[in-house]
Image (cartoon, rainbow, N blue to C red):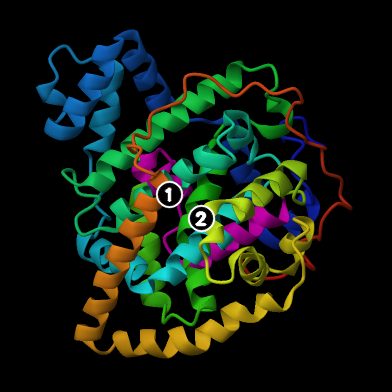
């Protein structure tokens, strides 16, 4: 193994045979973080309570309204306030409606496909494991914050400078900066194996989960997500992820490019580890899943249908008849969605219903607690370190034989 490559990577020769030098060009991103956010957070901390008030004022009124704002905070907002010339607001607003039009299917895809697919990375899941927000009320609150982040980004004008999606995205970015600093200072962190905490390569993987993996999951439910709409959805998340601190050169602009990046990342990751299985078990045992019609049994089946056989086997999900529920629902959801794409009044009703459903689900998960997206002050200490076993070339399916389907 090349010493500049983290040990988490597998099948590099096979990956190079399929994707060429893209594999090597992407690998240095494991050792890059988000310096703008890291330095801004350090400056906020140095100001004490006034630092967070300064952030609130900058988000609300702009950085020039903050008297004596430290230079790192000004540098961060100079980048945030610059809208790249490729941003098309009409495409972003059009894409945002997709989340709400999808209704319950969107929530199922987010939980049972996107989030759990993120758990499957045996190294990418380590910052979450170390924060300890993995079960019980903390899990429910984290899911409420995730749901509100996604809906805020997708609301009309949500990513505009005055939008809540913009404000929430910046807060999430600073939360990532805190976790990055805490993990890097913790003796349990294994940079040689995993790269730097919340590195650019893992932030890119998260972007792909919210963008192409989500869009492809909606198609499993029969939603009419053609290439144009899919690429509008990618466009929305390309800008959201730019605000989140993902390096713009890493972000794909087309469905084909996003799909290939997602396949490359999956093919060079090891199989799900014990932490992945614990995270998935906590998700399946959560009240969020218990509220689904049919409860846990149906949730397990939908996870298997949406994740695919290889990942589901690695997570030790049972193989039950409920895995056919997604296909059965697609026979109902698909025709309704195709009709909505042609009948504006039906589409508006579905979008309005989707807004109400998301608000209700987020409020229930939050259980009356405010959603702050505030960085943790410390990592959760535990008796045993996170599990990790450096993968070998035989530990997962090689790219030449792996499924070409996401995730």
Expressed as whole percent of the image width and height from the top left, the position of residue 375 reads 42, 27
The residue at which mark 1 appears reads as 365
| In front of the other: 149 or 201 | 149
- 293 left or right of 365? right
Whether 83 is drawn above or below 396: the answer is above
Query: What number is the disc on residue 383?
Result: none
Q: Residues within 10 Å of mark 1 (few under 14, many from 20)?
A: many
State yes or no: residue 251 in magenta: yes
Label 2: which secondary element? helix
| In front of the other: 261 or 198 | 198
Whether 339 is drawn above or below 263: the answer is below
How many discs mark residues in the rendered view? 2
Query: What number is the disc on residue 288?
Result: 2
Q: CA distance from mark 2 to mark 1?
A: 7 Å
The quadrant in which residue 40 appears is: top left
State yes or no: residue 255 in magenta: yes
Q: Residue at x 69, y 23 (%)?
A: 382
Q: Residue at x 34, y 8 (%)?
A: 46
- 313 left or right of 62? right
Whether 172 is drawn above or below 72: the answer is below
The quadrant in which residue 305 appears is: bottom right
Expressed as whole percent of the image width and height from the top left, the position of residue 379 reads 57, 23
Whether pointer 2 and pointer 1 mark residues with C-beta atoms closer than 8 Å, the reply is: yes
Expressed as whole percent of the image width and height from the top left, the position of residue 337 reads 37, 84
Label 1: which secondary element? helix
- 142 left or right of 262? left
Q: Residue at x 16, y 44 (%)?
A: 162
Quarter of the N terminus within the rendering: top right
Question: Start and end of the magenta stretch?
Answer: 241-268
- 337 left or right of 75? right
Q: Residues within 10 Å of mark 2 (few under 14, many from 20)?
A: many
């Amino acid at each position: 193994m090349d010493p500049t490559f983290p040990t988490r990577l597998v099948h590099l020769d096979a990956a190079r045979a399929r994707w060429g030098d893209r594999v090597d060009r992407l690998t240095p991103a494991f050792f890059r973080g988000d310096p703008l956010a890291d330095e801004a957070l350090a400056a906020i901390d140095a100001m004490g309570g006034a630092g967070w008030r300064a952030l609130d004022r900058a988000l609300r009124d702009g950085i020039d309204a903050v008297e004596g704002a430290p230079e790192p905070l000004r540098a961060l907002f100079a980048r945030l306030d610059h809208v790249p010339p490729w941003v098309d607001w009409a495409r972003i607003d059009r894409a945002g409606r997709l989340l709400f039009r999808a209704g319950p299917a969107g929530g199922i895809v987010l939980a049972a496909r996107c989030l759990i697919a993120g758990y499957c990375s045996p190294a990418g899941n380590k910052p979450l494991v170390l924060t300890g927000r993995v079960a019980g009320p903390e899990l429910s609150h984290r899911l409420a914050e995730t749901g509100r982040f996604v809906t805020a980004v997708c609301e009309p004008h949500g990513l505009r400078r005055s939008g809540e999606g913009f404000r929430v995205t910046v807060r999430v970015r600073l939360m990532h900066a805190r976790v990055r600093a805490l993990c890097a200072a913790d003796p349990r962190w294994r940079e040689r194996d995993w790269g730097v905490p919340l590195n650019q390569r893992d932030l890119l993987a998260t972007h792909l989960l919210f963008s192409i993996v989500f869009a492809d999951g909606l198609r499993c439910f029969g939603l009419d997500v053609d290439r144009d709409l899919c690429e509008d959805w990618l466009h929305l998340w390309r800008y959201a992820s730019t605000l989140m601190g993902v390096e713009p050169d890493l972000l794909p602009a087309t469905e084909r490019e996003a799909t290939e990046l997602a396949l490359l990342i999956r093919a060079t990751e090891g199989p799900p580890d014990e932490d992945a299985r614990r995270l998935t078990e906590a998700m399946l045992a959560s009240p969020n899943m218990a509220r689904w019609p049919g409860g846990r049994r149906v949730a397990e089946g939908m996870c298997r249908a949406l994740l695919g056989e290889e990942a589901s086997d690695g997570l030790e999900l049972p193989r039950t008849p409920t895995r056919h529920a997604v296909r059965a629902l697609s026979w109902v959801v698909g025709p309704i969605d195709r009709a909505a794409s042609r009948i504006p009044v039906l589409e508006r009703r579905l979008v309005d219903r989707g807004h109400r459903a998301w608000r209700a689900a987020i409020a229930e998960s939050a259980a009356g607690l405010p959603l702050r997206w505030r960085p943790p002050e410390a990592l959760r200490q535990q008796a045993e370190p996170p599990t990790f076993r450096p993968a070998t070339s035989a530990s997962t399916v090689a790219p030449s034989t792996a499924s070409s389907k996401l995730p």
